[in-house]
């Protein structure tokens, strides 16, 4: 489903899941809005959070929240209220949307997981960690500037650059290769498993997952 085809907001979701829930979790997929960015390496966070919302029972359809600068989906999973967002700010200003949602729903950084591409990790690997530096990723840099560094990271490898001399910004804005696109269903399945672990366990382990088959 493209960014522009998302259905408009029809009601406010804030009161849907407020009674009897033990925790609120925010899942953030990073990327750039617009059809021209679909299937690009830099948008793998959008791809994975789209898959999560589409495949997870209990998650509502995406709605546009202009005041929160994002597309947003809410749902109840187990004993948790889960909020998923895709910032509408473009990658380098992602923190503006995350901060707006955090302030509105009163979410602490240790209840947030951000899914993003990582050029320094080879395609086929997903590395998990809690907190840490931005490692040169402008979207993560923006998020950390707005809410601090104590949130979880799901770092999806998109490297190494091919050809080696290509500029990093040009490489990540290219579409995944045909061979990589064949592996994307396995990638999304692994990320869904990781998100389920996070929702029910509330903390990501420092770990590396491989999804190539």
Image (cartoon, rainbow, N blue to C red):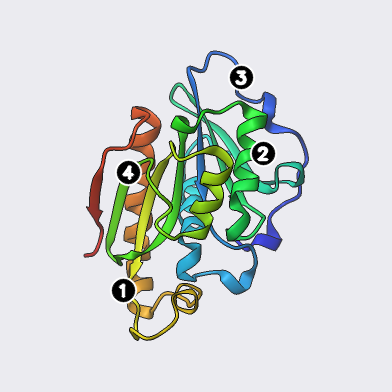
Q: Nearer the viewer, mark 1 or mark 3?
A: 1
Of label 1 and label 3, which has the lower sequence position? 3
| Looking at the image, residue 16 lies above or below residue 27 | above
Q: How many marks?
A: 4
Q: Does residue 61 appear anywhere in the picture? A: no
Left or right position of 192 against 112: left
Q: Residues within 10 Å of mark 2 (few under 14, many from 20)?
A: some
Q: Name the residue carrying label 1.
A: 160
Q: Name the residue carrying label 2.
A: 100
The answer to the question of whether label 2 and label 1 lie on touching residues, with beta carbons closer than 8 A, is no
Q: Name the residue carrying label 4.
A: 129
What residue do we see at 43% from left, 53% from top? 134
Left or right position of 97 against 196: right
What residue do we see at 46% from left, 72% from top? 172
The answer to the question of whether label 1 and label 4 lie on touching residues, with beta carbons closer than 8 A, is no
Q: Name the residue carrying label 3.
A: 18
Of label 1 and label 4, which has the lower sequence position? 4
In the picture as drawn, the residue positioned furthest to the top comes out as 20
Determine the secondary structure under disc 3. Answer: loop
């Amino acid at each position: 489903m493209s960014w522009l085809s998302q259905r408009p907001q029809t009601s406010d979701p804030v009161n849907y899941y407020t009674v009897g829930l033990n925790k609120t979790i925010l899942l953030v997929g990073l990327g750039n809005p617009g059809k021209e960015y679909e299937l690009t390496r830099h948008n793998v966070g959008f791809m994975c959070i789209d898959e999560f919302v589409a495949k997870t029972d209990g998650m509502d359809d995406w709605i546009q929240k202009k005041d929160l600068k994002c597309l947003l989906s809410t749902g109840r999973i187990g004993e948790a209220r889960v909020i998923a967002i895709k910032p509408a700010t473009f990658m380098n200003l992602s923190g503006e949307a995350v901060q707006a949602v955090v302030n509105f729903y009163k979410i602490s950084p240790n209840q947030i997981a951000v899914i993003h591409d990582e050029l320094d990790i080879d395609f086929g690997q997903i590395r998990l960690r809690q907190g840490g530096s931005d490692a040169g990723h402008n979207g993560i840099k923006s998020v950390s500037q707005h809410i601090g560094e104590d949130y979880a990271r799901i770092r999806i490898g998109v490297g190494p650059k091919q050809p080696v001399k290509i500029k990093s910004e040009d490489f990540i804005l290219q579409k995944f290769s045909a061979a990589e696109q064949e592996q994307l269903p396995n990638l999304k399945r692994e990320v869904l498993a990781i998100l389920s672990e996070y929702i029910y366990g509330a903390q990501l382990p420092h770990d590396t997952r491989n999804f190539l088959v």
